[in-house]
Image (tube, rainbow, N blue to C red):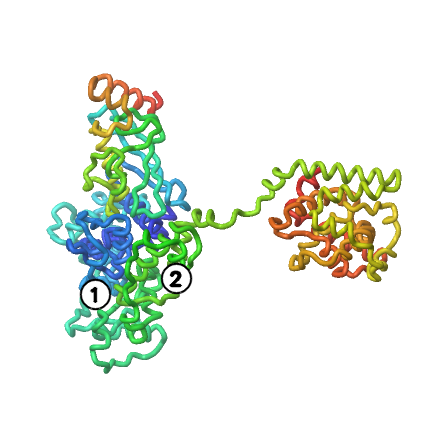
Amino acid sequence: MSVAHKRLLKEYKELVRESPEGICAGPIDEDNVLEWECLIRGPEGTPFEGGVFPATLSFPKDYPLNPPKMKFTCEMFHPNIYKDGTVCISILHAPGDDPNQYEDASERWSPIQSVEKILISVMSMLAEPNDESGANIDASKIWRENRKEYERRVRICTRKILGL
Amino acid sequence: MNRLNDLDATLPDPADWATSRIPDLAVLDAALRCEICKDFYTAPVITNCGHTFCSLCIRRCLGADEKCATCRAPEQESRLRKNGAVQQAVDAFMAVRATLLEAVSGIEEAEVSGQAVNAEEAAEVEDEIEEVADIPPPSSQRRRGRPRKKKADDEDGDEDEYRPRSQETPPEPPKRSLRERPPDDGLVACPICNRRMKEAQVSLHIDDCLAGKPYIPPREPPSLSSPRKPSTLPSSSAPPSRPTLTQSRFQPSSTFPPSTAPPTGLFQPLPKITYSLFTDTKLRTKLRELGIRSDGPKKLLQDRHTEWLNLWNANVDSPRPRTKRQLLDELEAWERAHVRPANNKTKAPEWSDEKWQEKHADTFADLIAKARGSIQKRRKVEADEDEVEERISGEVEGAQIEQLRSSQPPPPNPQLRTANSAPAEMGSFPPSSQTTTLLPSSQPLQQSSQPLIQGPSHHLMTYQNISRPHHETIPPHGAASLLPSHSSANPYPTRNPHPPTNPQENQYVSSIPYVPGPDRLPAEKRKYETILDEIPWAGPGRAG
């Protein structure tokens, strides 16, 4: 069993035992632990509240040396989420690559981070977008200039997720 | 969930203690684990900033980014130092972990049965019991394990009456057995035979113990085991019922008991190299010198070298170094896991039937048409020799044609004559050059080691004489279908894995002694049919 495999199984075990509130994650196929699926509950008090957002995590073979990639599989309207669902957050950026040239090294990926920490970070990112790194320029702009419109757009996504 | 239960057995983790009587042991368990691999430290080293990791883990990390994984302080591999104290602590803990876990667990069942006995309190406890019965084991253990944590510490029993009672009565046996042997003599019990000995001797002893040898109190000077920290745990110390990955890591120690292990001096740390100063060739030489694989592009060579350095230098830090053979196996495993796809690309492109068929589809079609045409023509009239030769020229390499044209027909081969004397319906088959040459395509499967070219006389001989006896053994439809396979091979003899040549035809004939007679035919036919099936590039022809 490779290091990545072993470590992911440990993290999975840990998450099943005790996962933080509003977060649920695990391998899609137990024979391939490098592909995970996760569900994140929209944080309370935000327009995401009430929604449960599915995403996939793709781990590199040299995990935990390098971070996984995270992609929402539902429509998301958020300044830090690309239109294809890919999440842009510093914890998912390897120390070497800094697409936005602003991130503090201390926020970036390090092998001691974990799936749990990633998901918690993403959850808090949903609540508090970082408008410095605009992955979705439209969303960034609307978020900065017209918060009400932003919330309305987000609620539409949330409702879509719930099938309303 | 089943899978997860399996994980429980194979992946020990701090949460194992959550359900025990001393849940705080989870903290100790976690403290002895590397933050990178989340496993017990293997050959722990300490960074300049005071963080400890497995040697291999941090070396790999520093290869990617020269910073401490925990605090991101700049760090270099050369500054890592062995952390002997942690190694000792891990070894000691690993040695007793399974036993300890067994000793402090078991509270669950005991408590449940205790509740069942006290039926008069059922009203109060009912819910609890149901909970226990309904919920699958892992979660129930967790839920119930947590509150108990405090209860074990302060036994005031303020909320539930049944708890103190259950703690007094049923779970005692394991507890007592622990209390019965407090280590007042400063010795440690062998987990297998329970004999007490000095901690440092346990690992030496366990190997012998497993091998069935009696325990002989060692008289050796302590210096033997002290230079390499007393390694108290080989994997064998754990009961076989709880095989663990972490323990399997320690297995080498049983193959290398400290007494026979090579002295650490044998393994000298390898220096890093600056890859930009190395050309491909130089790097390859370097890898060969190290005794590791040296194929692949430069990037792979670099990665492989780096990984080898990591493995090797981590091994140097280990109190139980492994052999080079074992390290090579690990390198191979690493390569399989990380670079296999890249590695495949570096190999010569695999032969692709589809591509070949696609590329030469026109030629195939043309040749099939020609073959059919020639057969029909032959049936009507005798073939015009010149025309036939022209067709050959389309398929056979120039040199060969020259040979064909210049050489005289040799005296008939006696062997071929026998062949020629073979039965009946062959007469109806035209001795066309194409039908002749189609044969060899199947032949290389049997004799691929033949020399490419022989004397011209062989060509003509085969050309003129061989075709008949062989054709009769081939099903008529096979004749046309075989054609493209030959023609596809001939224009590019060097690229073809089994270049068919005329001389081989000859070899072929002689290699299958022809026995005339009807009995021979079915077997021969079958043979050809199987050969046909094995020819990968005969596809379009057969389809047509």
Q: What subunit carries mark 2?
A: B
Location of the N terminus of chain A (image quadrant): bottom left
Residue B393 lies left or right of residue B516; in this view the side is: left
Q: Residue at x 23, y 40 (%)?
A: A108
Q: What subunit carries mark 1?
A: B
Residue B56 higher or lower than B352, as above or below: below
Total labels: the figure holds 2
How crowded is the residue under tag 2: few (<14 C-alpha within 10 Å), some, or many (20+)?
A: some
Name the residue that disc number 2 marks: B328
Q: Nearer the viewer, mark 1 or mark 2?
A: 2
Residue B472 lies left or right of residue B331; in this view the side is: right
Give the percent coordinates (x, y) of residue B102.
Answer: 27, 60
Kind of residue sitting beneath label 1: Gln
Counting residues from the start of the chain, the first of labels 1 and 2 encountered is 1
What secondary structure is marked by label 1? helix
Residue B88 badge: 1
Give the percent coordinates (x, y) of residue B140.
Answer: 28, 46
Residue B472 badge: none
Which residue is more in the foreground, B182 or B56? B56
Kind of residue sitting beneath label 2: Leu
Note whether residue B133 is visible: no
Residue B50 lies left or right of residue B298; in this view the side is: left
Location of the C terminus of chain A (image quadrant): top left
Q: Residue at x 36, y 76 (%)?
A: B212
